[in-house]
Image (cartoon, grey):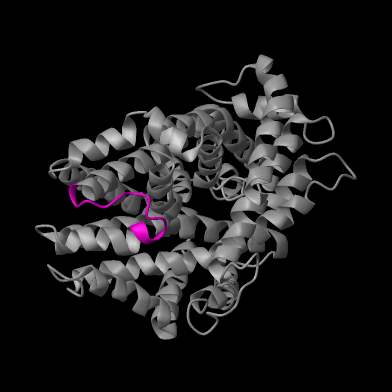
Amino acid sequence: MNESRESFGSRIGFLLVSAGCAIGIGNVWKFPYITGQNGGGWFVLFYLLFLLIMGVPVLTMELAVGRGGRKSAVLAYKALEKPGSKWHLHGWVAIFGCIMLMMYYTTVSGWMVNYFVKFAGGVFKSGMSADAVGGVFSEMLASPSEMCIWMVVTVLLGFLVCSFGLQNGIEKITTVMMAALLVLIVVLAVHSLTLSGAGEGMSFYLVPNADNVRKVGLWNVISSAMNQAFFTLSLGVAAMEIFGSYMSKDHSLAGEAVRICVLDTFVALVSGIIIFPACFSYGVHPDAGPSLIFVTLPNIFTNMAGGRLWGALFFLFMTFASFSTVIAVFENILSFAVDMFGISRKRSAFICCIIILVLSLPCALGYNVLGELRIIGGRDVLDSEDFIVSNLLLPIGSLVFLMFCVSKWGWGFDNYLKECNTGNGLKIPRFIKPYFQFILPVLILVILISGLI
């Protein structure tokens, strides 16, 4: 064990920072609208199933590589791989994935901060027309300065927090943010349940309905649930691996992985409790896609008693959810630079900050200056970057982590199992090895192929 390696000050700090990495736009933005598009209750059941049988195992593998190697991805692979093998090349791909994720995530995170400021500042007024509410989003996208300013604020604040170190920066700030996030989400959910159409919204959301599934198609529901279970945990680009490298050996990895998933799933499910009753109360169908957060919900808030307050609280919650992911992924990029090039944390934060600022500009300008630019299959900049991360790097990266941990050419199942089961808590049984070796890779390949199709 590398004695100079930073570590978390507390177990709760590790759990909240790791869950903060997983909890983000995928939970609060993507989960509700994909649930709406896929018929509600059955989708939620499949999502929970795939989180358990796919998400938890691969999460233990990322954490095991991190805790076993005690370094960021490239050097952790090098410490664990057999001499002469090249698994560490995936570490470089993983860091590229983290950088590409931040190339668009920082822009969307900036939208959350912008909307919080807009609601708190009274831009959204009671009784605004639907066209006026939608116009706020359109005007934001069309303004290069507005798009860039909030992206820059997100990047600067993120690297500032990371520059203070693991315990004094990331753990301290994320613990406060996550505590506030959990309080906010409960307050918002309780408020939504008091709305007039809450019962109908909750029924659509959580009661499985075969008719809804038939409309969408069972396979579409299943494949969407598989994809969402993967996307929500940010698996495959070593975003979680780095926190494994800071862990103690006191607790087993399966137990910690389950706790992270429970926190992540709690936020996703309760986000639905906020959104679906509100949608049904105001006669809006909850399958509005990405516009759900920035057009549909602001329309609801402006027609709601105390809507300015509830809108501000909702987007403060969204800001915390997205910013916790930004900080976590920035830490991975920064730690990689420290490990690989031997520079100080503060210098690494400065250099990485400049790089991310420059690389985030195409996305921030992708709806205005670069509005005509189409990259992959007619997609704009943001959707193209998201396609590469979500449909390629996450599933392929997860498959690499899996094969490294269970194959004789990699670290090997015995070494993985020993690392995973070190410490108190839930253990992974040895008899599960055939599932990890033969069934889990097929499930991940299905995600990869369905995403490409």
Where does residue 437 sit, x and y in percent of width and height? 74, 26
Against 220, residue 366 (above or below) is: below
Q: Which residues are magenta?
A: 281-292
Where does residue 326 sit, x and y in percent of width and height? 47, 60
Residue at image location 63% in from the left, 51% down from the top: 391
> Is residue 376 covered in magenta?
no
Residue at image location 56% in from the left, 28% down from the top: 53
Relative depth, front residue between 151 and 75: 151
Relative depth, front residue between 40 and 415: 40
Residue at image location 74% in from the left, 26% down from the top: 438
- Is 412 displayed left or right of 198 in the figure? right
- Is 178 displayed left or right of 55 in the figure? left
Q: Main secondary structure of the magenta part?
A: loop
Residue at image location 37% in from the left, 46% down from the top: 32
Indicate the quadrant containing the N terminus: top left, top right, bottom left or bottom right: top right
> Is residue 290 covered in magenta?
yes
Q: Count the marks.
A: 0
Where does residue 218 sit, x and y in percent of width and height? 52, 33
**Residue closest to the far top:** 431
Q: In this rendering, does residue 415 appear at all?
A: yes
Against 51, residue 29 (above or below) is: below
Against 452, residue 306 (above or below) is: below
Where does residue 181 sit, x and y in percent of width and height? 30, 50
Relative depth, front residue between 345 and 364: 364
- Is 360 displayed left or right of 45 in the figure? right
Q: In this rendering, does residue 72 appear at all?
A: no
Relative depth, front residue between 443 and 437: 443
Q: Quadrant of residue 295?
A: bottom left
**Residue closest to the far right:** 84
